[in-house]
Amino acid sequence: MTSHNMASHRHQFASWEQSQEYYVETNLTDGLPIVPPSEDRVCAMLEFAGLPPDQVIGVEVIRQKHITAEKVAINAVMAGCRPEYFPVVVSAVAACCERSFNLHASSTSTNGVTVLVLVSGVYAQKIGMNSSTGVMGPSNRANATIGRAVNLVKTNFYGSVPQEMDNSTFGHPGKYSFCFAENLDAGNWPSLTVDKGFDGSSSTVTVVAAYSPLQVSVYGGKDPGSFLAGTAHAMIGLGPSTSEVLVVLSPEVMQYVNDAGWSRRQVQEFLWGKAQLPAREWIAWRRVEHPEDFTDPDRLVGCVADPDRITVVAAGGAAGVYIDVIGSWGNSRPVTRKIEIRS
C-alpha cells in the first residue's frame, strides 16, 4: 500500500457509496464492500491490543516489507473486524512473515493457494469464533473477518493483487477468507496449541498456505484403520511434492477415533504410511518433475516427507461423518504463533 493509500483512513468521504468507489478504484478491496477505516476505528484496534501504530509486526524478507501495527489495523477495520479480533489478526500476519512460510512465493505463484488461519485455544471461544457446524462456511463474523483481514493485508500492503502479482490460475473462494477454530469439545486429544508445544492456557494461530479443501466421506464402519485409508487416497491425489497436509476430522469421526483409542500421532503415522506409492508409479503418472532423482523405482515415496508434516485437528458439526483434506503448497511450511492478549 503506497503512502498515499495508507493515509486514506484519514480521508473524509461525503457518503458511504463514495468511500466504496474510492477503494474499488484504488484496488484496495477484494471486490466486496469494506468498512471505511476511520481514525477512531483504527485507534480502537490498536488500543485493544496495546500496540503503537509504528510497531513492526513482521518483516517479509524477499521484498523487505515492514508491516506495522497501523497497517494491519487499517485492513482489520476494512475487513469488518471487531477490536477483540485484532490480536488474532496480528499473530496471523506475524506468522505469515516468518521465512519458513514463504509468503512471497505463495503470493505470486499460479498454484492458487490462500492463507488459511486456524485458531486453537480458549480465546477463539471468547471472541465467538465458529468451530462447529458450517465451520468453513459463512455467517460467523469472527471467522469471516479475521481471515479476510489477513488476506487484505497480503493484497493491499504486500501487493499480491490478482492478475498482477497474484497469478493464480484458478484461485479459490478461500482467497476472500479461510479461517476457523479447532473444536475443543470434539475429543480427548490435547489441543493443537499443546501439540505444537505451547502452554495449555495459551491460544495460538496457525497459518497455512492452503489449497481448497477436499471433503472425504467416511465409509466402511468405525474402525480408523479402515476409513482413514480413504483419506490417505485423497492425500495421494495431492502428489509427492506437497509440503504439509491439514486433516480436519468432524466430531463424529473424532468419536470413532477416540473409541478406538487412537492418538493424534497414530493417525498421523497411519496416514503417512498409507499415502505412499512406489516411485515408478509417481513417475508413470508424471507427478514428479525430476524422475532421474529416483534411482530406485520400487522405493516408497509419500505425498509428504514424514508424519510430522500431517496436522490433524477436530472441527465441524456434530452430524456428518466427513474428513477434510487440505494440502499446503510445496515451498511453504505452516507456522504457529501464540496470540498475545493484553491483560
Image (spheres, grey):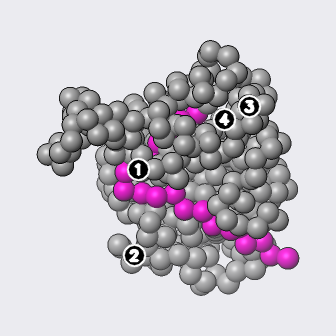
Q: Are marks 4 and 2 in contact (CB under 8 Å)?
A: no
Q: How many marks?
A: 4
Work out how far the residue at label 4 is from the one at label 2, CA to CA, in angstroms: 35 Å
Q: Earlier in the sequence, mark 4 or mark 3?
A: 4
- In this figure, which residue is indicated by the disc labeled 2? 61
Q: Nearer the viewer, mark 4 or mark 1?
A: 1
Q: Nearer the viewer, mark 2 or mark 1?
A: 1
Work out how far the residue at label 4 is from the one at label 1, CA to CA, in angstroms: 22 Å
Q: Nearer the viewer, residue 273 or 154?
A: 273
Q: Earlier in the sequence, mark 2 or mark 1?
A: 2
Label 4 sits on what residue type?
Leu
Q: Earlier in the sequence, mark 4 or mark 1?
A: 4
Q: Nearer the viewer, mark 4 or mark 3?
A: 3
Q: Residue at x 51, y 64 (%)?
A: 96
- In this figure, which residue is indicated by the disc labeled 1? 305
- In this figure, which residue is indicated by the disc labeled 4? 249
Give the percent coordinates (x, y) of residue 93: 57, 66
Q: Residue at x 64, y 61 (%)?
A: 196
Label 2 sits on what residue type?
Val
Label 1 sits on what residue type?
Ala
Mark 2 Cα-neighbour bin, 10 Å: few <14, some 14–19, many ≥20: some
Q: Nearer the viewer, residue 262 or 197?
A: 262
- Magenta segment includes 53: no
Relative to 128, does residue 249 appear above or below in the rendering?
A: above
Q: Which residues are magenta?
A: 324-343
Q: Is residue 22 left or right of residue 203?
A: left
Work out how far the residue at label 3 is from the one at label 2, CA to CA, in angstroms: 46 Å
Mark 1 Cα-neighbour bin, 10 Å: few <14, some 14–19, many ≥20: some
Q: Are marks 3 and 2 in contact (CB under 8 Å)?
A: no
- In this figure, which residue is indicated by the disc labeled 3? 260
